[in-house]
Image: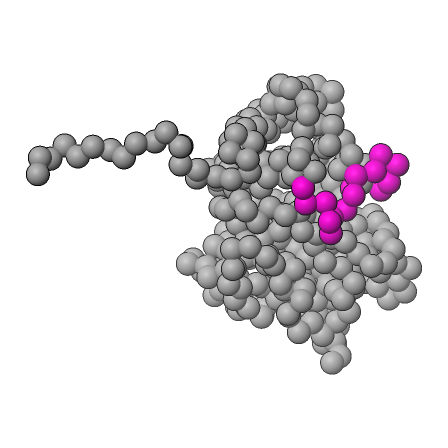
Amino acid sequence: MTSSPGKIPVSVLIPAKNEESNLPACLDSVARADEVFVVDSQSSDRSIEIAESHGATVVQFHFNGRWPKKKNWSLENLPFRNDWVLIVDCDERITPELWDEIAQRIQDPTHQGYYLNRRVYFLGQWIRHGGKYPDWNLRLFHHKLGRYENLNTEEIRNTGDNEVHEHVILDGSVGYLKADMLHIDFRDIYHWLARHNRYSNWEARVYYNLLTGKGKDGTIGANLFGDAVQRKRFLKTIWVRLPFKPTLRFVLFYILRLGFLDGHAGYTYGRLLSQYEYQIGVKLYELRKFGGQLNVTPTNAQPAKSTHES
């Protein structure tokens, strides 16, 4: 199949669920793509209507509760008509400058995949410090050559049906694009907290697997002398063993990595990251206490006595 005239021969994949606030701007930003798929999880708001009104193809994903999650399922099952796929979350925007660069790179590619640098906006402000920038994500690649890693977190429920912090494992070389992708969530702090409550379930399982040595197969390994992702994984194997992580995370973000230069938004973001780290720690404690299993009934639990006489 051939691309539409005037369009860039890239297939965009947008995972979605109840994203009516973010979808219009996201879809507007990918209008130059030849093909756009919105993979939805039975949204109850206007997400489907919005996606279809922008000319996107809507596909429903029904999660089985374990594996695969939405992005890997989409990479395996969607009938992409282009070799290149660009994965964009609903709260992300592809700028005209980035589209120009994408069009140039895929015309004469030197790699099979490209990292995009993301600017995170919080409370209407770019969080430029605190280690949030640069924020490299492998989002543009040959769809047949890349799949998200499985970090063996399926045992933890209530983490959502979409890959969030998993990374793409690509059978090929990678490069880096210069223009930035924007991360701008139009929803409020309530949704940030709700989302990170789910993420902390996932992070606690990742921490648990790192401490117990479980779930290493099929993942990007930890290597101090490897690429950016491998170095980050190596540092995480040390991080999970440190005490006082909530305090350390705030100090690292706000002081050592100059988060204070982002003013009130930077301070608020740092405090929320510290709270997030505390949530991970509590959930990790729960996992370790019960040997990786949740909802365990205490062995000395006694059935409640009825207050009604027979």
Tell me, what colour scheme is on the image? one colour
Instruction: Please identify the quadrant where the C terminus is shown.
Output: top left
Residue at 66 percent of width and 55 percent of height: 88
Q: Is residue 260 visible?
A: no
Q: Relative to 256, is 66 above or below?
A: below
Residue at 57 percent of width and 44 percent of height: 185
Residue at 86 percent of width and 40 percent of height: 226
Q: Relative to 307, is 63 above or below?
A: below
| Magenta-drawn stretch contains 218 | yes
Viewer-nearest residue: 135 or 196? 196
Residue 96: quadrant of the picture: bottom right
| Magenta-drawn stretch contains 187 | no
Viewer-nearest residue: 290 or 284? 290
Instruction: Please identify the quadrant where the N terminus is shown.
Output: bottom right
> Does 245 sit left or right of 226 as displayed?
left
Q: Is residue 273 visible?
A: yes
Residue at 51 percent of width and 34 percent of height: 290
Q: Which residues are magenta?
A: 214-229
Residue 308: quadrant of the picture: top left
Position of residue 262 measured from the top left corner of the image (x, y, whole percent): 67, 26
Residue 183: quadrant of the picture: top right
> Does 251 sit left or right of 227 as displayed?
left
Position of residue 22 measured from the top left corner of the image (x, y, whole percent): 54, 52
Q: Relative to 175, is 223 above or below?
A: above
How many dots with numbers?
A: 0
Position of residue 75 measured from the top left corner of the image (x, y, whole percent): 67, 64
Position of residue 212 measured from the top left corner of the image (x, y, whole percent): 66, 35
